[in-house]
Image (cartoon, rainbow, N blue to C red):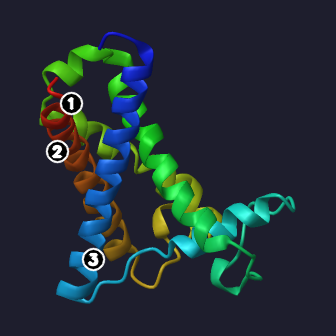
Amino acid sequence: MSNSIELWIAVVAIGMGATVVMDLWAIVLRYGFNIPSLSYCLVGRWFCHMKDGIFYHSKIAAASSKSAECLVGWSAHYVIGIVYAAILVLPAHAKWLQSPSVIPAVVVGLATVVFPFFIMQPALGLGVAAGKAPKPGSARVKTLLTHTVFGIGLYAATLVYQLISNY
């Protein structure tokens, strides 16, 4: 990378690409196995309630809906994916982009389960690591698999970025 703007372009592209891979995984789960995914509209509802000082909900689905909650939720989903890509790419700068490997990407993907397990799920009323979900074990496995797929998406998006940018 010749400059920081190019590095940030790579981070944004890789984060968005990995998030798309995660979204494709959710589609496979929904239509191939009838396993529903997290509603990003409800995530948006959670973020929208924060401006009112409400950070925790006993059940986010029962909270009052907010205008633009779907836009906010989907935007947050992609911004978070970009932040996670930055966690992978920025410490190594261009080194990882020049020679990506799957292990660091999957490790970052798995490390990101800290956010849903200990922040999002409790705040949405599901408890720590979805302990209050109807099927906590299934919810945990799904979260771990989804974040593993995100990690694989980080790696795959980097390979695509290399091809497109002639890196």
What is the crowding at mark 1: few (fewer than 14 residues within 10 Å), some, or many (at least 20)?
few
The image quadrant of residue 105 is: top left
Residue under label 2: 156
Query: Residue 57: x and y, percent?
Result: 72, 72
- Residue 125 visible in the current orientation: no
> Disc 2 versus disc 1: distance between alpha carbons?
14 Å
Residue under label 3: 27
> Disc 2 versus disc 3: distance between alpha carbons?
18 Å
Q: Check residue 165 in the rendering and tell me which mark sits there, or answer none.
A: 1
Which residue is at a point 45% across and 74% down the rendered structure image? 38
Mark 1 or 3: the one toward you: 1
Q: Do the residues labelled 2 and 3 touch (CB within 8 Å)?
A: no
What is the crowding at mark 3: few (fewer than 14 residues within 10 Å), some, or many (at least 20)?
some
Residue type pointed to by label 2: Ala
Q: Kindly give the residue lying farthest to the top in the view shown.
A: 2
Q: Seen in the image, is 71 located left or right of residue 83?
A: right
Q: Seen in the image, is 93 located left or right of residue 103?
A: right
